[in-house]
Each structure stands twice: as C-alpha cells, then as structure tokens.
Image (cartoon, helix red, strand yellow):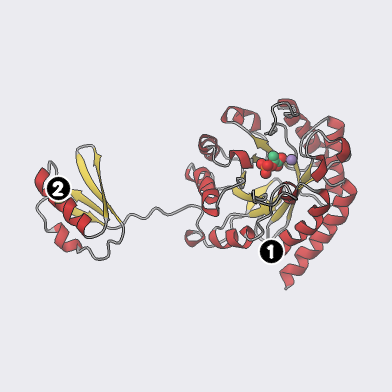
Amino acid sequence: MIIVLKPTPNKEEMERLITWLESQGVLVHASMDLSQINLEVVGDTSRLDKQFIEALDVVDHVQPIRRFERCTDRKFHPEDTVIQVGNTQIGGGSLTLMAGPCSVESEAQVVAIARAVKASGATMLRGGAFKPRTSPYAFQGLGEKGLDLLRVARQETGLPLVSEIMDVSQLDLFKDIDVIQVGARNMQNYELLKALGRQDKPVMIKRGMSATYEEWLMSAEYVMAGGNNQVILCERGIRTFETYTRNTLDITSIPFMRRLTHLPIIADPSHATGKAWLVGPLSQGIVATGADGILIEVHNDPEHALCDGEQSITPEEFDSLAGKLTRLHGFMKEL
Ligand code: PEP
Ligand code: MN
C-alpha cells in the first residue's frame, strides 16, 4: 500500500501516522518524489482500514497495492516462450540439440565438428571464443578470431551459433552471434545482464554454481526488464559436497523452472559432471524430465583438447546419443 501525503504535511501528524502504522505490525518507508512524500507500507496491510487512513488530515489518498509483476513469471505469461533462432526454434515442444567444442581451437577443428554434429541432428553449434578459466595460465580462448572461425563454421553448415560473452565491452563483437551465452561465473554480472537486455539477440543464462532458483530467475529478470524477452535458462550443475563429479546436475530444476517460468529451459550434462561417460545417461534424464534442449561438448580429439577434453564426447558418440535422445523425446511426448 502506498499512502500519498498532502503537500507540505504537518510533520507531527506524519510522525504520528508512521508510529501508528508500525504499531499495526507493518514496515513503513517514507520516500520523497519531487516535493511529494509517499509512505510505502509493506507487510500484512489487510488489517489497515483504507477509508480511516484517507480521512486523516495529513493524507491525500491511498494507492492500491502496486504489484511488481515479474516478466519471468508464468503467472503473468501462461504460454511457453518460443525463441526463433535462424530456421530452428527453442521451446514450444521441440528438442534443441546444441553441440560443439568447449573452445574454438582452429578452423579445421571447429568446421569438422560442426559438420559432424549437424549430420547427427544438432540444431545449433556451440563454441567458446572467450573462455572463463579458473587459472590465468590456462588457454583463454582465441577471442575475436574464435568468433570469426565460428562464423566460418556457420557459413559451412548453416548451424546458428551460441557463444559465451564475458564482459560488456565485448558486446559489439557479438552483434551477429545468434545466441549470446552468459556463463555460470557471470550469472550475477548485473551490468552485463542489463546491457544484454538492451540488445535484441537471444540470451542463454547458465545457472551460477551456487545460485538458487530465485537468483537464477532474477538474472533472467534483469535481461527482460531491459526489454529483451528472448531468454533461455541453462541448468549446468551446482557445487555440492560430492567430489567424484565436477558439479552435481540438479535435475529437479527442469520441471521446477517449467512451473515457475514460461522461458525455455535446457541443460548441460558436460559441465554438470565433467566426465564424458556420464554425458549419455544424464542426457537421457534431462530429456525425460522435459527440457527444451541440451548443450553437449563434442570434440574430434578429446585427448588433445585445449579445454574440457575429459568431458567431451566424440562426434561418433554424439551421433549415437542424438539418435537416442530424439527417440526418447518423441516417446516422452506420447506418454
Ligand atoms: C561453457 O559452456 O563453456 C562454460 C564455461 O560453462 P559454465 O559457464 O557452465 O561453466
Ligand atoms: Mn567447457
């Protein structure tokens, strides 16, 4: 409830009103809008008598509760959001298969992988050009050149691209990247999220390693509040006490996000486990729990990969997995 006071209100009367409101168990925050003083009343306002308050000398009128509707909330947007990317779509009952190397390493590497995953049914090519590495001494990605090589692979295969941005200053470089990825480490980089809200490319937000559902949704809210409604959520595992796997895939988040939001939800079994042999079984779990898509790291020479070789599957393994996942997705729709 917002209590709008008369211009230049009597100070004592105003203080008396605040004290009385607080005695009713609500919190009061006085804010000044030009010369206008408003009392924002938060808490259980159901016991407060609006007419009684409006009858006070110091009060001009009481505004009905201002509800901050959330753009991400399914309550206010019951239909699923479907995002069109090139000639493929994310959400709306389809299964998006995003596949490609952790990092772009060379033209030969990224084009060979792109051709292979496309032939196996991938609908988007992933590849990191700017890499957020734990160690500053590890391979940091090819940067701008990496984005150029992704463009070559797109030209060769027609696959739309998804690649990670690390900083607001890189925004111009991503102008023609089909889906801009915000990595787990940047999920709460609010300046980046705001800037992504002001441009019109779809944004895929990976869940932070220790982010709650609420925090993750709020990151999506930042992008949407800026006017960009094309947001995809990507579950990629969270930090737990388990050390056998790189992270722990929180499969619960898939149906939970489906309930909370209309945004498409996809999942990444590669970063979730850090182990190539776990990518297959977890992918099946992801599809079975209703995800709109899956993001998988594929490398044509995992042993020599410059980044995340242990969790990368080969194009041959992807080929057999993609077939299984497409069949499973069809089966789940009929169930
Ligand atoms: C990635 O997708 O290459 C990546 C770095 O993932 P995450 O942000 O989930 O760790
Ligand atoms: Mn990776």
Circle 2: residue type? Glu
Q: Quadrant of residue 10?
A: top left
| Residue 115 tag number | none
Query: From the image, which quarter does the N terminus lie in?
Result: bottom left
Q: Residue at x 47, y 59 (%)?
A: 76
Assign a secondary structure to mark 1: loop
Assign a secondary structure to mark 2: helix
Q: Position of residue 289 (x, y in %)?
A: 69, 63
Identify residue for label 1.
289
Using residue 10 as the reference point, say whether residue 310 is left or right of it: right
Identify residue for label 2.
15
Q: Is residue 40 above or below residue 111?
A: below
Foreground: disc 1 or disc 2: 2
Q: Position of residue 32 (x, y in %)?
A: 24, 40
Where's ligand 1: which quadrant?
A: top right
- Number of labels in the image equals 2
Q: Nearer the viewer, residue 54 or 228?
A: 54
Q: Is residue 179 visible?
A: no
Circle 1: residue type? Thr
On whether ligand 1 comes within 8 Å of the CB at mark 2, the answer is no
